[in-house]
Amino acid sequence: MVLDVKNISVKYKLGDFRDIGLKEYFVKKITRSYEAKEFWAVRGVNFQLEKGDFLGIIGTNGAGKSTLLKVISGVLSPETGSIKTEGQITALLELGTGFDAELTIKENIYMRGALLGYSESFMKNKFSEIIDFSELEEFQGLKLRQLSSGMKSRLAFSIASLLDPEILILDEVLAVGDAGFRKKSEAKMLEIINSGITTLFVSHSLVQVKRLCNKVLWLNKGRQMAFGDTKTVCAQYDEFIKNKK
């Protein structure tokens, strides 16, 4: 077993000083009118993945998909539950996470590799492959802040998919960028499937999930609705969406 997720729950507090401002927070505390509300972004999620599984995580906006990925990748700590992993995790979450806007493309590639624990010699060997795949060779001297969102997405996907992780976490990575690069990225995803890398993939495209994934996790308002083979869970989700209209 490569990934074992048991009873994961994540709770946020709404209405504290980060949401309403420090001054209003203290006024409300003094007048005893302050009340922080709790919001469960993820509640009681359980699943297991074996080596080579390609998991699609589906659900409408606010389902808790991205929050769950952040917990698995170690960005967030859960309120309850445990996660056991075997192998190196590479995560591509929100666009720009793990990058420095003031560094060049080349510098960001090396920095990202270092943050993930790869040696400088390994990154030197991988650099040409990453920059070629991203189609950004002529822009490698530009600072990250000078890039378009599509260029940033190409860079982030290229780094994440070409660093040979044992567990790859991807959050909506194929939603940004031109059609040509999306097609190339999907071909790379199929290559990843065949290489035996265990992958977790959030997508709003059910067609894409059906084409790429062998297992699917369906979340709704933070709760796990279903986990299992792609055909079965996607059929359940299709029915759910139809009944909502």
Image: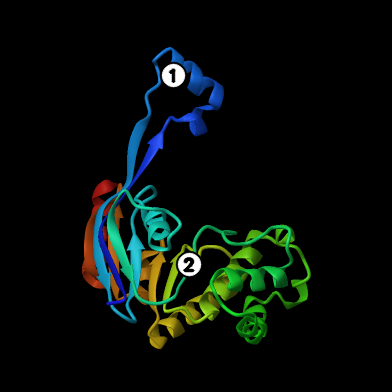
- Look at mark 1 in the image and give the residue it sits on: 29
Label 2, label 1: how far apart the Cα atoms are: 39 Å
Q: Residues within 10 Å of mark 2 (few under 14, many from 20)?
A: many
Q: Quadrant of residue 31?
A: top left
- Does 47 sit above or below residue 26? below
Side (left or right) of 125 relative to 54: right
- Of 191 and 177, which appears nearest the observer? 191
Q: Is residue 83 above or below residue 12?
A: below
- Answer with the quarter of the image where residue 144 lies: bottom right
* Residue under numbered circle 2: 91
Q: Could you tell me which residue is drawn at 67 percent across and 77 percent down?
A: 135
Q: How many marks on residues?
A: 2
N-terminal label among 2 and 1: 1
Q: Is residue 204 above or below residue 193?
A: above
Whole-percent x, y for residue 137 in the image: 73, 77
- Comparing 13 with 187, the one in front is 13
Please tell me whether mark 2 sits on a helix, a strand or a loop.
strand
Q: Nearer the viewer, residue 87 or 136?
A: 87
Helix, strand or loop at disc 1?
A: helix
Q: Quadrant of the N terminus?
A: bottom left
Circle 2: residue type: Ala
- Three-letter code for the amino acid on which mark 1 is drawn: Lys
Regarding residue 44, the answer to whether it shows in the image is: yes
Does residue 139 appear to the left or right of 30 in the view shown? right
Q: Tell me the tag on residue 242.
A: none
